[in-house]
């Protein structure tokens, strides 16, 4: 089939009523086969998306988090040269562990924080910068009564912040070294829940993952706010 033939088919389809378009779409999907998840759940992609659209904010935030992880894997990590990676099985405080001949680096992925449908800004405390929320979704307390939703320094090596809320693009990320994040008050072992994120790359935030890995491996001392 030539490009001209395909163009004629495309033009003909564009003129069809919506009902006929949906019928053709269903036939094409049948020919291509369902995604394994559709088969596992015995449903179709449109039903899954419709269910997500009806879900509450908490559920949507979780799904957006999974989308950010997939975007980092497909748009960034899989394009690295000389690295192997995987999503580790079991319960870990990081999303990815990547490895080269120098060792392993762990990465936690978070979406830029949204409030009232808009990217959350730093306000009086941090000014005109974005924010990211870094804590676990499940509530709980340890034996001493401390909240377990907070991450601890050492739980992961790098933080990747997806900038989809402000850019509309799932392949835009900023990276920083986890040890450069702010601690929770006087508790130097725990990472503060809300962290300021620069709008653009600077000396503590970079849009290049390998640059951030080099920062981490250098052992340099920095802090995301204020950047020294």
Image (cartoon, helix red, strand yellow):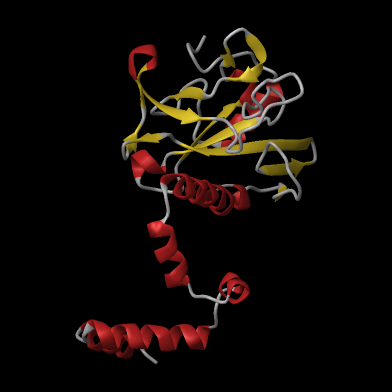
Residue at image point 40% right, 65% down: 50
Q: Examine the rendering and report whether any part of residue 7 can be seen.
A: no
The quadrant in which the N terminus is found is: bottom left
The vertical placement of 172 against 226, above or below, is below
- On screen, 7 above or below 187? below
Q: Is 48 situated above or below 121?
A: below
Position in image of residue 13 (x %, y %)? 26, 86
**Where is residue 120 shown, x and y percent of the image?**
36, 30
Counting the numbered discs, the total is: 0
Q: Which residue is painted at 31% across and 91% down in the image?
A: 5
Classify residue 37 by image quadrant. Answer: bottom right
Q: In the image, 7: left or right of 45?
A: left
Q: Position of residue 82 (x, y in %)?
A: 71, 47
With 102 as the anchor, is 124 left or right in this view? left
| Among the 4 quarters of the image, the one containing residue 92 | top right
Left or right placement of residue 60 versus residue 218 in this view:
left
Residue at 43% in and 27% down: 131
- On the image, the x and y values in percent for residue 177 come to 61, 25
Image point 60% across, 30% down: which residue? 212
Q: Nearer the viewer, residue 63 or 74?
A: 63
| Residue 50 vs residue 9, the one in the foreground | 50
The answer to whether residue 193 of the structure is visible from this angle is yes
Task: From this view, report whether residue 117 is shown above or below residue 124.
Answer: below
């Amino acid at each position: 089939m030539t490009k001209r033939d395909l163009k004629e088919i495309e033009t003909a389809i564009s003129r069809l009523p919506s009902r006929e378009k949906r019928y053709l779409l269903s036939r094409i999907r049948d020919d291509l086969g369902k995604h394994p998840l559709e088969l596992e759940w015995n449903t179709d992609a449109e039903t899954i998306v419709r269910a997500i659209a009806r879900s509450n904010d908490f559920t949507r935030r979780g799904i957006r988090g999974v989308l950010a992880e997939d975007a980092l894997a497909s748009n960034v990590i899989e394009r690295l040269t000389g690295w192997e990676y995987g999503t580790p099985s079991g319960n870990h405080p990081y999303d990815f562990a990547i490895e080269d001949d120098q060792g392993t680096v762990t990465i936690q992925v978070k979406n830029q924080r949204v409030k009232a449908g808009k990217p959350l800004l730093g306000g009086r405390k941090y000014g005109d910068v974005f924010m990211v929320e870094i804590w676990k979704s499940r509530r709980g307390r340890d034996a001493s009564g401390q909240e377990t939703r907070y991450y601890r320094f050492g739980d992961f090596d790098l933080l990747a912040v997806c900038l989809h809320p402000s850019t509309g693009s799932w392949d835009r990320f900023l990276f920083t070294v986890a040890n450069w994040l702010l601690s929770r008050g006087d508790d130097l072992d725990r990472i503060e829940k809300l962290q300021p994120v620069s709008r653009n790359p600077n000396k503590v935030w970079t849009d290049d993952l390998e640059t951030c890995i080099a920062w981490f491996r250098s052992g340099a001392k920095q802090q995301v706010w204020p950047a020294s």
